[in-house]
Image (cartoon, rainbow, N blue to C red):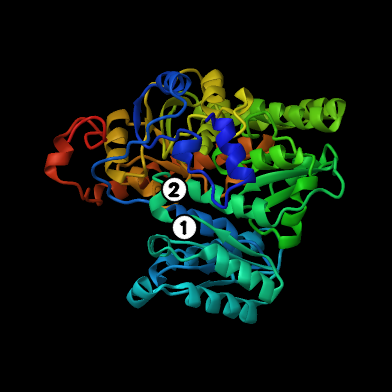
Amino acid sequence: MTLEQKHHESATVGQEVIIRERRLGALLTFQGKGSDLMKLAKENPEGCCHDNYFNQCGDCSSQRAMLPISQIRDAALVNHAPIGCASDLGQFNAQHRRGLRYNAIPVQNIRALSSNLTEKDLIMGGENKLAAALEEAYRRFAPKAIFVTTSCASGIIGDDIEEVTLNAEEKLGIPIVPIYCEGFKSMVWTTGFDAAYHGIVRKLVKPPRERRNDIINIMNFSNQHAFSPLLAKIGMEARYLVHQASVEELAHISEAAATGHMCETLGTYIAASLEKLYGVPELKSPPPYGSLWTDLWLREIGKITGREKLVEKVIVSERKRIAPELEAVRKKLEGRTVFAFGGASFCHNMLALAHDLGLKIVGMMGFHHDMTFDNDYEEIISLKNTLTLVGNIGSYSVCNKQPYQMIKILQDIKPDLVMSRHESLPTQAVKLGIPTFFAADANILGGYDGVVTTGKRILGAIKSRNFVKNLSAHSREPHSAWWKKQKDPFYFAKGKRL
């Protein structure tokens, strides 16, 4: 079965999404040059998802599924799991409130419950608890839809989630959307995003009433609506998904002119699903990070919507507007080296920005790597686009969020600056005395303004280097003397050695 056939089956037939290892040939560990990984992806697109024999920490696809779902404004979430599986909901609530406040939407808490499976339920079954939790969620929140996320526990005991949700849907009169995201099913935690979007496409999205030539779907997180001002210049609106959206808005995402995303990792599944099922084209360009990629993104929108001439005028105008500030920032950053780590595709976005700012790229570390994307268009292969833009990357690693590996790589490369996407991870560089730029709100780095904004924030990070050095002097590395002596960061990688 080809990758395209796998996606077609997943998007149109099955209750569950096909995991990324099978669908996209995802990898969790790699060390070499960027060109080596690109060659490997061409020779073996099915991949081989080895992990490490030893992991300090990890992530869970169930948590990644709960993140976007919990941010839908008028829906509720029931996590069918032991209570500990809901531990991240507090963090998700903070993200939800912050995102609403960013965008002048009335602030509210997420609507979420746990079915609280216990040891007794793992013996006797948890279907009655799930049914009761669904009724309680309906009574407490009066939602327009309820999502059910599964867990390792519910998967192991074999609860019939489909039957329970169909019965509740008939009784309550609203969509009940099962999300099959048991953590043990996939080694790649980003499969959780796909599971969430699969449920949305399967149960909520309706066929288009009409096609809107002025709306672009943008897959993003709970960030500021920073793409809107740029799109407004060409007479377009952004529909941000799925964070902060309503159930009604999700029902009509099939009516948009196209679907784009702030990173291919996040948007690959739903963009391909909307194209295959409803004819909504995915933007065949890199995301709008850095001037050149923003040019390509706008031109693709112009091509799809018949706004080519207007787009060219906007590109010329915007480039001219930011030129003085961009040149001033470049002069101050000239000659500095940068290392990036984060989610694979957004890491590529940060490197596009670094290139635009004149920084010398000495390496990157992605937390996983998809050998292909769901639509398999050459124009959206983010690694290929990055290597075309910045040249080969001499130190290119894929690492499943392991601090013990990150620290050893940074100690070897010793960059002037680290660019990071995920919370808590910047502290690893700071402990080594390296100034760090944290891309907390990914959206404000996009477009032409995002290039200048990023440059100014990087300058601010570099100015803090003495403070960072003081922190480093008083930080203790927790790793053993034995590990400090090892030269290979991937000593524990499966497929190499024990």
In this view, the residue in front, 444 or 489, is: 489
Q: Is residue 104 above or below residue 300?
A: below
Q: Which residue is mark 1?
A: 63
In this view, the residue in front, 94 or 160, is: 160
In this view, the residue in front, 363 or 344, is: 344
Q: Which residue is mark 2?
A: 189
Tell me where residue 476 appears, x and y as whole percent: 22, 50
In this view, the residue in front, 320 or 340, is: 340
- Residue beneath the point at 45% across and 33% down: 25
Q: Is residue 114 left or right of residue 414?
A: right
Secondary element at tag 1 = helix
Q: Is residue 436 above or below residue 313?
A: below
The reply to whether the C-beta atoms of the residues labelled 2 and 1 are less than 8 Å apart is: yes
- Residue beneath the point at 52% across and 64% down: 161
Tell me where residue 3 appears, x and y as whole percent: 54, 31
Mark-to-mark CA distance, 2 and 1: 8 Å
Comes first in the chain, label 2 or label 1: 1
Q: Is residue 340 above or below residue 179?
A: above
